[in-house]
Image (cartoon, helix red, strand yellow):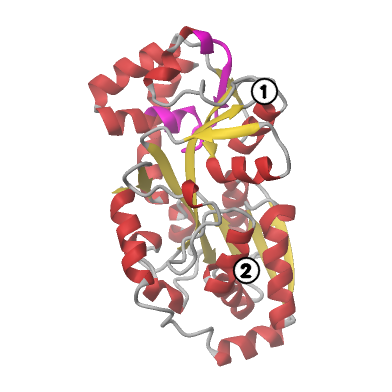
């Protein structure tokens, strides 16, 4: 678990080093081209980022990408079943979950692209199994038709205002992007005793728990079903706002920042093409594609298109958690959430 200021300083320092990492090895490119295709299990929305990345990869290398989108839990289960059956279909997968069980099952290739030499150490697995490709910052989103700018919550205490009672929603899934993650963050920031006190007060606000993803919660806020969404990805807000949605986000301190990571699978049908796709997604070229679609890149040489979305550790602060740290904290988060908000 890292404070965003440490990560922001590391990103800035590494950026000053220049673009020293070499492109993918020619031998890997040649072997990948012989395989001709790659299968990608992704959590990315296809028409927002998954598709553009796949199309750019195909254009660059002439390798066909077959991308299938699903929720992180479904991807993990599918990969585990494929590995146990000895019939691995995916060459690459991504998501915000820790691949610990998959690593233990031998389903994840211990491999990282050369570009990690440019990354701060918090952005890649020290054991070699994953590389971050997206920073996900979870904060408050609000419908600007229902919450005029200037009246939105600007602090956690503002969420306790009686005017928001019954008008807020979050995902009830036990994850960093749900109410459980918000509760976990409160205890990290305030300590267990004060954090629980705040959460007990928040529970009186009758927050609506939706058994769906954070993105789907945001869509319902946009539709006017709720005034405020908690644990909303701020880059998703920017993406929707650019196409005219009545939505904005508030940089309440601190936010929770999680990593979406990408890995190559073991015993896959197209192992070289899989590694080459991982290399492309986290490369400067791939990260520019993410940036241009308003996602928060992790490559030190690529700044977000909207500079406000990536916490700077000063005006906007966040706690960064690796997938493994989130995984270890989830049992405690679940207990607190079930006790106070179910």
Residue displayed at 65% across by 76% down: 270
Q: Is residue 35 above or below residue 49?
A: below
Q: Kindly state the secondary structure of the residue where label 2 is placed.
A: loop
Q: Quadrant of residue 329?
A: top left
Would you say residue 174 sits in the magenta stretch?
A: yes
Q: Residues within 10 Å of mark 2 (few under 14, many from 20)?
A: many
Q: Kindly state the secondary structure of the residue where label 1 is placed.
A: loop
Q: Quadrant of residue 225?
A: top right
Q: Is residue 133 left or right of residue 252?
A: right
Which residue lies under the disc numbered 2?
Answer: 91
Q: Position of residue 287 (x, y in %)?
A: 55, 66
The one nearer the camera, 228 or 231, is 228
Q: Residues within 10 Å of mark 1 (few under 14, many from 20)?
A: few
Assess whether mark 2 and mark 1 are in contact (beta carbons under 8 angstroms). Answer: no
The one nearer the camera, 65 or 223, is 223
Residue displayed at 30% across by 23% down: 195
User: Seen from this angle, which residue lies furthest front?
Assistant: 150
Q: Is residue 64 left or right of residue 26?
A: right
Q: Is residue 266 above or below residue 69?
A: below
Mark in front: 1 vs 2 = 1
Q: Quadrant of residue 339?
A: top left
Task: Report the span colored magenta.
Answer: 163-183
Would you say residue 88 sits in the magenta stretch?
A: no
Residue 145's tag is: 1
Q: Is residue 25 at all visible to an observer of this figure?
A: yes
* Mark toward the start of the polypeptide (1 vs 2): 2
């Amino acid at each position: 678990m890292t404070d965003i200021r440490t990560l922001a300083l590391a990103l800035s320092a590494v950026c000053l080093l220049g673009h020293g990492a070499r492109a993918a090895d020619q031998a890997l490119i040649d072997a990948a081209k012989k395989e001709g295709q790659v299968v990608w299990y992704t959590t990315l929305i296809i028409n927002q980022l998954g598709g553009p990345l796949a199309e750019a990869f195909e254009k660059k290398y002439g390798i066909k990408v077959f991308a299938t989108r699903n929720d992180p839990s479904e991807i993990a289960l599918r990969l585990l079943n494929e590995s146990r059956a000895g019939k691995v279909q995916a060459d690459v997968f991504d998501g915000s979950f820790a691949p610990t069980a998959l690593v233990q099952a031998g389903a994840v290739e211990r491999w990282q692209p050369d570009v990690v030499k440019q990354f701060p150490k918090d952005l890649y697995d020290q054991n070699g199994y994953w590389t971050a490709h997206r920073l996900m910052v979870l904060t408050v989103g609000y419908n600007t038709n229902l919450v005029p700018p200037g009246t939105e919550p600007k602090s956690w205490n503002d969420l306790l205002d009686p005017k928001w009672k019954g008008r807020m929603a979050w995902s009830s899934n036990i994850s960093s992007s749900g109410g459980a993650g918000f509760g976990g963050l409160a205890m990290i920031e305030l300590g267990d005793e004060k954090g629980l006190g705040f959460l007990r007060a928040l529970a009186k606000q009758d927050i609506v728990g939706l058994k769906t993803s954070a993105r789907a919660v945001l869509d319902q806020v946009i539709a006017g079903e709720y005034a405020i969404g908690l644990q909303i990805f701020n880059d998703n807000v920017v993406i929707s706002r650019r196409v005219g949605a009545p939505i904005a986000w508030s940089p309440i301190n601190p936010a929770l920042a999680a990593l979406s990571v990408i890995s190559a699978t073991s015993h896959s049908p197209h192992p070289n093409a899989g590694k080459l796709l991982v290399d492309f997604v986290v490369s400067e070229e791939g990260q520019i594609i993410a940036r241009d679609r308003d996602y928060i890149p992790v490559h030190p040489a690529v700044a977000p298109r909207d500079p406000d979305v990536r916490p700077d550790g000063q005006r906007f602060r966040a706690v960064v958690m690796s997938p493994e740290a989130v995984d270890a904290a989830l049992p405690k988060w679940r207990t607190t959430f079930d006790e106070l908000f179910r």
